[in-house]
Image (cartoon, grey):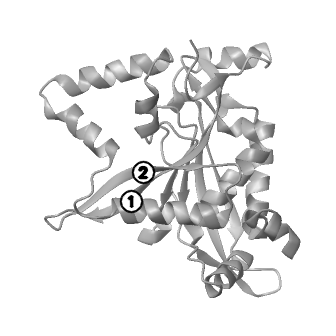
Amino acid sequence: MGRSDGTRVKNIPAIDKLIPHVMSRRYDATNFCKVEFDMTNLHAFIRKLRAEGHRVGTMDAVIAAFAFVMQKVPEINRFIAGKKIYQRNHLCVSFVILKRSEDGQLDETAVKAYIEPSDTLLTISQKVRELIQENQKPESQNAMDRLVNRLVSAPLLPGFLVGLIKWADRRGILPKSVIALSPFHTSMFLSNLASLQMDHVYHHLYDFGTTSLFVTMGKPSRVSSADDKTKRVMTLGMSLDERICTGAVWAKALFELKRTMENPEVLLGAEGEREE
C-alpha cells in the first residue's frame, strides 16, 4: 500500500537511494543557505496591484514564488519517509499566525494552504488572507489545535501517541485525514520574521512529518549598489534536506526563486506574461 501524500521515486541513481540510510535523520541532512533579492520591482508590482484593488503582500509573493518554482523544479517538492524518497502529490505551504486568545494573551497556531497548479499570486493571496482571518479569531480553534489538545489532555499519553504517529508515518499508513491536518506534512514551512522586525534565521527541520524545506523571511535592509543608489533587499534564510535531490537541482531552484522574486509579473500566470 502506497502513501496518500506521495509517490515513491525509484528511477534515481543507486547512491541517491543509499543516502537516506547513511543520513537517516532530517537534521543530519540539513543544509543552510540564503537567497537575497532586490525588492524594487516587487514593491512597484505590489503597489500597482493594490491600486487595482488587490490586497497582496510580500509574504503572498514569497509563497507564490515558491509554488511557481516547485512546479518548474518538482524535485524540491520531495520528502523522505521510512528512508525512502517520495514525490509529493500536492503542493502546500504551512505557516504560523499570531492571534489573541479570549483572555487577551498572545497565542499562535499553525495553518496550511493548499496550492493548485492553476493558482496565481492573486488566488494564493486570497487563500492566505482567508486562512489568517479565520484562524485569528480569539474563539477559533482549527482542527490541528483540537487534535493537539486531545494529545496532551491525558497524562503519559502524549509521548506514546506521538510515537505511534511517527511509526505509522514511517510505514506510510498514517491516515490521510491526519496528514491533511498536520502542518509538519508540507512542501514548505514558512516563517515571516519580517513582520516581527527580525532578520532571517536558519530554522531547524523537523524530524517529525515530511517537511524538506523551512524558509524564514528577514526584515528588509537598505544596501548601496554600484551606481551609488540604495535598494531594499530581503534575505530568505533556508534550511533544506539535501537528500531529496542533487545540489545542482537545488541550485537551479534557488536561481529560479531569485529571478522570480525580482520579476514578479510571472506570478500572474498568462495574464502577467501578456503584460510583459
Q: Is residue 111 left or right of residue 158?
A: right
Q: Where is residue 234 shown, x and y percent of the image?
A: 62, 69
For the N terminus, the quadrant is: top right
Earlier along the polypeptide chain: callout 2 or callout 1? Answer: 1
Rounded to the nearest angstrom, the CA distance separating label 2 from label 1 is 8 Å
Q: Classify 10 Å Cα crowding around label 2: few (below 14), some (14-19), many (20 and above).
A: many
Q: Position of residue 163 (x, y in %)?
A: 33, 20
As drawn, 76 above or below 94: above
What residue sits right under mark 2 in the picture? 111
User: What amino acid is at disc 1?
Assistant: Ile
Image quarter (top left, top right, bottom left or bottom right) of the C terminus: bottom right
Q: Is residue 72 above or below residue 127?
A: above
* Classed neighbour count for the residue bearing mark 1: other residues with Cα under 10 Å, few (<14), some (14–19), many (≥20): some
Give the camera-side residue of 59 and 140: 140
Q: Which residue is mark 1?
A: 97
Is 261 on the left or on the right of 107, as rendered?
right
Res. 65 in view: yes
Picture quadrant of residue 181:
top left
Q: Answer yes or no: do the residues labelled 2 and 1 have beta carbons within 8 Å?
A: yes
Q: Amino acid at mark 2?
A: Val
Helix, strand or loop at label 1? It is: strand
Question: Which residue is rendered at x = 42% and y = 51% of the image?
Answer: 111
User: Who's the residue at 33% across and 43% down the image?
Assistant: 143
* Residue plotted at (71% across, 79% down): 45
Question: Compared with residue 219, is residue 165 higher up or lower down, i.e. above or below?
Answer: above
**Residue 142 on image: x %, y %:** 32, 49
